[in-house]
Image (cartoon, rainbow, N blue to C red):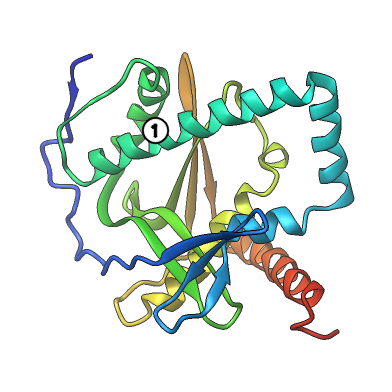
Amino acid sequence: MGNVRTHAFVLMQSSPLPHFTAKQIRSQGQQYYIDDRGNQLPSVTTILNATRSAEQRERLANWQQRLGIAEASRITTTASRRGSGTHRQLQRYLQGESVACSEAIQPYWQSLEPVLQDIDAVRLVEGTVFHDELRYAGKLDCVASYQGIPCLCEWKTADRPKQTVDRLYDYPLQLVAYCGAANQLYQDYDLNLHHALLVIAVPDMPAEVFWFEPETLATYWQQWEQRVHTFWRRLGYFKG
């Protein structure tokens, strides 16, 4: 495959945000981040997985039963590797590096390329963020501008299009969780995100683009807060 190069303009147009890192650990199958004060904070995905609704748990169980545990595990592992490879490709691209695209990632990269033409003013790529008040952490994909509007960007891959927001399941909650943590962590760096972009790469077709306005994000934020409180209440931290 040929080299994939960035646009002629420099993607890092706005002032870059400081890049924080944190030690990651797994405990009882759940992922946690250790902040600079030694606090062990659950990841966004850990909270979402632990607070799934009965309907979500039943849907997952039915899917595993229909395919068989071995086949379901294979599909999940393949999807995880595909997503990780696509993220690495995007990270290098957004940081202005010249990269070669592997054959396995090529269909997803081709799906994403039209959307990337509208991304600029990149301020952060693959950054760890923390929310001190709600006590969670995670690694966001990108803070940049899409068609001139500052936003949080998240990249996903899928074998088939999602088509509607209802089929995104917990993806919007991931978006608002990272937005909230980024806004708190970088409040002294002129960051105040009110929009979010979710891009889903699908082979042999343009990527799906889901754009979230402030009012919609506010609604999802309320749902996310409820999930966080449910998580901590089950551990005995929050009452009520």
Seen in the image, is 226 located left or right of residue 122? Answer: right
Total marks placed: 1
Q: Quadrant of residue 217?
A: bottom right
Give the structural element (helix, strand or loop) at label 1.
helix
Q: Is residue 58 above or below residue 51?
A: above
Could you say which is closer to the camera, residue 237 or residue 59?
Answer: 237
Identity, as a three-letter code, of the amino acid under mark 1: Thr
Q: Quadrant of residue 79?
A: top right
Seen in the image, is 172 located left or right of residue 96? Answer: right
Of the 4 image quadrants, the one containing the C terminus is bottom right
Seen in the image, is 50 located left or right of residue 175? Answer: right
Q: Residue furthest front?
A: 28
Of the 4 image quadrants, the one containing the N terminus is top left
Residue 74's spot in the image, x, y percent?
A: 63, 24
Residue 9's spot in the image, x, y percent?
A: 12, 43
Seen in the image, is 127 located left or right of residue 240? Answer: left
Q: Residues within 10 Å of mark 1 (few under 14, many from 20)?
A: many
Residue 190's spot in the image, x, y percent?
A: 31, 76
- Name the residue: 44% across, 56% down: 140
- Name the residue: 35% across, 72% down: 191
Q: Residue furthest left?
A: 8
Question: Which residue, given by chain and number where applicable, does mark 1 sit on?
Answer: 86
Q: Is residue 118 above or below residue 152?
A: above
Q: Is residue 193 above or below residue 117?
A: below
- Name the residue: 36% across, 19% down: 106
Residue 28's spot in the image, x, y percent?
A: 67, 58
Q: Is residue 162 above or below residue 124?
A: above
